[in-house]
Image (cartoon, coloured by chain):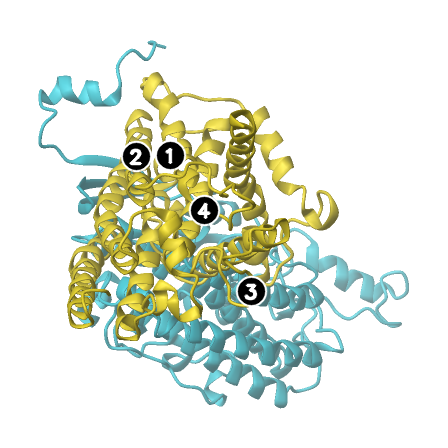
Chain colours: A cyan, B yellow
Amino acid sequence: MEPLTRTPLEVEEETTGDLGARHMVVNFGPQHPATHGTLRNIIELDGEKILKLDSEIGFLHSGFEKISEYRSYNQSVVVSDRMNYLSPLNNNIALAQAVEEMMGIQVTPRCAAIRVVLAELSRIADHIIVVGLQGMDLGAFSVMLWTFIEREKLYDIFENVTGARLTTSYTRIGGLMRDVPKDFEEMIRAVMGRLESTVREVEYMLDENPIFVNRTRGVGALSAQESISFGLTGPILRAAGVPYDIRKVRPYLGYEQYEFEVPTEKEGDCYARYRVRCREMIQSLKIIDQALKKMPSGPVGVSDPRIVIPVKNEENRPSGGMEGLIYHFKNFMHGHGVRPPKGEVYVPTEAPNGELGYYLISDGTERPYRWRVRGPSFYNYQAFARLCEGHMLSDTVAILSSLNIIAGELDR
Amino acid sequence: MVTKDVLYKLVVFLATVGIAVGLVPIMTIVERRVAAFIQNRWGPNRVGPWGLLQPVADGIKAFFKEEFVPARADRLLHFIAPMLVFVPPAIGFAVIPWGNQIGSVKLQAVNLNIGVLFMMSVLSIAVYGLAIGGWASNNKWSLLGGLRASAQLISYELTLGLAILVAIMMAESVDPQVIVAKQTRGILSWNVFGGGNLLALPCGLLGILLLYTAALAENNRLPFDLPECEQELVGGYHTEYSSMKFAMFFMGEYVAMVNMSAIVTMLYLGGWYFPGITNPADHSWLGGILSVGVFMAKTFAILFVYVWIRWTFPRFKYNQLMNLGWKGLLPLSLANVALLAVVGVFTGGKP
């Protein structure tokens, strides 16, 4: 390697022959404290003003989609929760929804209700962190730590239910890994009151804080028309005034039975996104309350031993009855188990940061032919360069945290 | 007895340096514990009783870190910058009277009759440290931090100067001893309450507000910590500093904070005087120690507000900072000085 004898500045001076009126080019990431994840942005600055911003992605590419083509459908649930590490349960549920739709399975009412509760809890866990991070990136560090406490409480619930805090892998095709623990409702009720007061506290802290409002109002604003043409979804689109929510537009898991509003704001700027997230958390709490009130009893898995492994009891205990042993065994044998019919399916669900859709092509075997994810981060991140145009350097962090880009989902 | 006087002077001088530098570790632990309290967590509580030895551990860690100088950095300037940040605030502490006199010894390292002016001139040196540190690191983020720091400090120095001028006008002196002495005639004689003239009360209140806001900006504290904001500029001007050089920047910030709080106390809050606790005519040992205690209590109250603000507010944007400084605070502080002058004329030439 050639020893470093000249600074980049000198090299640039030699090539351009001019060290006078020039713009500064800085690397914003991939190693930068404000890029939550490994995102790289090359920013051309005129003083503090951004002239041009180039985003480069792929630093966290993990080949999730390709990996899943070599796994059975139930095995790739494990892959799905590694993608969006702020809301893994939503990813688990979205995958199960897609495969079930392809196979024409109707999950049991109890399973659907549990999935709804967990999806909404996961949505709150995501939103509360994003709201905290929005504060932190503007310097209000305490807000982030207050919200992190609440997420810990939610993670405790996830751990009790699924056995893991982050890598939940809770859904199975046609059901769940197991039923929820007996004190499921008490656990959630205990956290719900706290959550609401924390959301109110954060609102009290930031809503009318002149510095916060000045830093976010009009920053990174996008019109409804433009948002749609960028393919933005989720809170970002709703902040621009479009009441588009998959839970309302194309209800799944019986979302049509629950009463809730789709909060929208008009401005489409960072402040509007913050407001939408805060209001959505309150709506999610309403949904959880309703779902817990009428939580049906019964099994969580469909009663089809070819899809869901049967309950282990006296009759079909693997060590007992031969018949039971065979059913258990067949579920995991090559060429058996969950095998959707030939065809393809795209099933969208409402993940915390936008429309999360699974596009699956089945060739009739137990492994997908193609496993493709429409991760909301990928589409939302496209707008980043446009949003930063003409703003100051300080605004990039405000905009980036308001978009809620998860690098794992962005690069997959 | 010349030798005795010199000895006394030396003791007071060393004590002053000790206070200025010794308050830094106390302040770091206070800051971290208060921050932890605000954020519902424990903070450092493992090293020593209640975590009180944490600053010592921090210091030892800083010593053992590798001292890194980036390739192609200007080594000399890179070396000088932290000193330029650390030393001026420590020198500025020399003219602050931090207690009533004991016997004939005044608790002030240097009894300078132009003390306030000396302090202002010394404090304005610190900006060079930040600008040079940012430039010498050969790093674009550091450079941006240094640029922001120099622009911010120069802008807010005007407001700072005008807010100090209000106190000088009230006391009609630039001698710290005189300024404090004039505020020892009851609580209403404090400059924050108009320095004994109730008509000047609004000037005093506005003055301390302006002084404190400018002080926050001068010390690069939230909501004005743009030069070193982690989320935007990685570490700002001290991105490329490690080991004791970084510790010097860090301590420099805290010494400047302590110094600024002492200035606010001295100029507006009556210095070491508090009615009922300290008596200006009492030159005994007990009175002296009580007066030092009062001064420290006031200084720490102001430092606490620093910490409180830091962990509550978001930070400004660069252009908003400049707008506030030039379009908001500067006209306001000019108007304040003019108002005080008018009040002074109408109340017999003595504001």
The residue at which mark 2 appears reads as B125
Q: CA distance from mark 1 to mark 3?
A: 56 Å
In the picture, measured across the screen, residue B232 lies left or right of residue A305, that is left
Indicate whether B155 appears above or below A74. Answer: above
Q: In front: B283, or B154?
A: B283
Q: In front: B275, or A64?
A: B275
The dot on residue B97 is: 4
Element assignment for label 4: loop
Indicate whether A305 appears above or below B100. Answer: below
Q: Estimate how packed mark 3 is, as few (under 14), some (14 to 19) or many (20 or more) residues with alpha carbons within 10 Å.
A: many
The amino acid type found where label 3 is placed reads Leu
Are the residues flagged by discs 3 and 4 from a single subunit?
no
Marks 3 and 2: which is nearer the front?
A: 2
Do labels 1 and 2 touch, CB within 8 Å? yes
The amino acid type found where label 4 is placed reads Pro
Do labels 2 and 4 touch, CB within 8 Å? no
Q: Could you say which quadrant of the image residue A328 lies in?
A: bottom right
The amino acid type found where label 1 is placed reads Pro
The residue at which mark 1 appears reads as B88
The residue at which mark 3 appears reads as A89
The dot on residue B3 is: none
